[in-house]
Image (cartoon, helix red, strand yellow):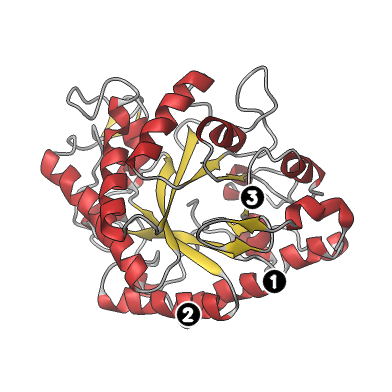
Amino acid sequence: MNNAHSALFRPYETKWHSFPNRIAMAPMTRSQSPDGVPTKEVARYYRRRVEGGTPFIITEGTNVNHPPSNFDANIPRFYGEAALAGWKHVVDEVHAAGGFIVPQIWHVGMMRKQGTGHFPDAPSVGPSGLIRPGKQISEPMTQAEIDDVVQAFADAARDAKAVGFDGVEIHGAHGYLIDQFFWEGTNQRTDGYGGSMLNRTRFAQEILRAVRKAVGPDFLVMFRFSQWKQQDYEAKLAPTPQDLEAFLGVLVDAGADMLHASTRRFWEPEFDGSTLNLAGWCKKLTGLPSMSVGSVGLDDEFMASMRGASAGVADITRLVECLEREEFDLIAVGRALLVDPDWANKIRDGRLSEVEPFVPEALGYLS
């Protein structure tokens, strides 16, 4: 092992699993599941990352059983006999390689273009029908629609446990449906789901409680969130540490076990006066296991890649320093691991010159 990177390869013990290092695979949608059914090639893709030294796999975003949850029919579903059988094969392959795997369950909300996905005739849904501030393209969600989506997340979590996954991650980030409820720019409701910051968390709380009821007290429930949105990179759900503490507190009370704090660049401080990033503040404020993410091992942030830019290999000195200070517990690696399944082993062995650079052809949608 390269001693300079020893903090990254320090074991991490949890009540769910003993991880040999701190590396997780970040969720990255690739649209490689025809009609939403994961194939044997998808199973091999995830297994290769475990064999390459990444013990913790978070799958690409998978859509819950609600007609407008999806904007691409080749993004995997998390419902239906064929899709769940495909996911069971994925789980079996990852477990055979010694890995730990959770699916990311997801509803895209108003980020869906009308006429796309598995049910193209279904109207897109969101808290206020806004795709971004000032642009309304549908009616606000009804209570019945909200209840249906909450149940769909619970059903997906139940099915994840039934097919052998080790936990589940709820996607509450990046301007998708749950985040559309969080963000006052897209949530202009005047009922109990809108208004104050805490009211805007009600939808997420209901999902977390329903998921927890479906899977029981011991199954890992992760929650991914972000301050930024695809609609607004500078957006802030919680502009102060005090706001963040209140925001996270209700999610933890509702059932979140682990927080996955999505940032575009993991090394950037979240608030003035502290070097902690968003995941660092999650750990400080809640005491829960926290996972960071954001341009690990590459010299340009991922939204540039979404616009067609390549990214070169970068060292991980800053990441190791954060882990040495125990600011957060785990690090999710995205594009670097997408193009190089052996990234973790190469970093462990000091073979930085062998790490593959990122090319945009490898990247699908942002999850």
For label 2, the SS is helix
Q: Of the residues tagged 1 and 2, which is closer to the observer?
A: 2
Q: CA distance from mark 3 to mark 1?
A: 16 Å
Query: Residue at position x 48%, y 60% from top?
Result: 60
| Residue 282 rendering spot, x and y as whole percentages | 54, 35
In the rendered image, which quarter contains the N terminus?
A: bottom right
Q: Earlier along the polypeptide chain: callout 3 or callout 1?
A: 1
| Residue 152 rendering spot, x and y as whole percentages | 24, 56
Q: Which residue is mark 3?
A: 331
Q: Residues within 10 Å of mark 1 (few under 14, many from 20)?
A: some
Q: Which residue is mark 1?
A: 52
Q: Is residue 79 left or right of residue 60?
A: left
- The mark total stands at 3
Residue sitting nearer the eye, 124 or 171: 171
For label 3, the SS is strand
Q: Residues within 10 Å of mark 2 (few under 14, many from 20)?
A: some
Give the answer, above or below, for where 267 lies relative to 157: above
Query: Residue at position x 69%, y 71% from top?
Result: 52
Q: CA distance from mark 1 to mark 2?
A: 17 Å
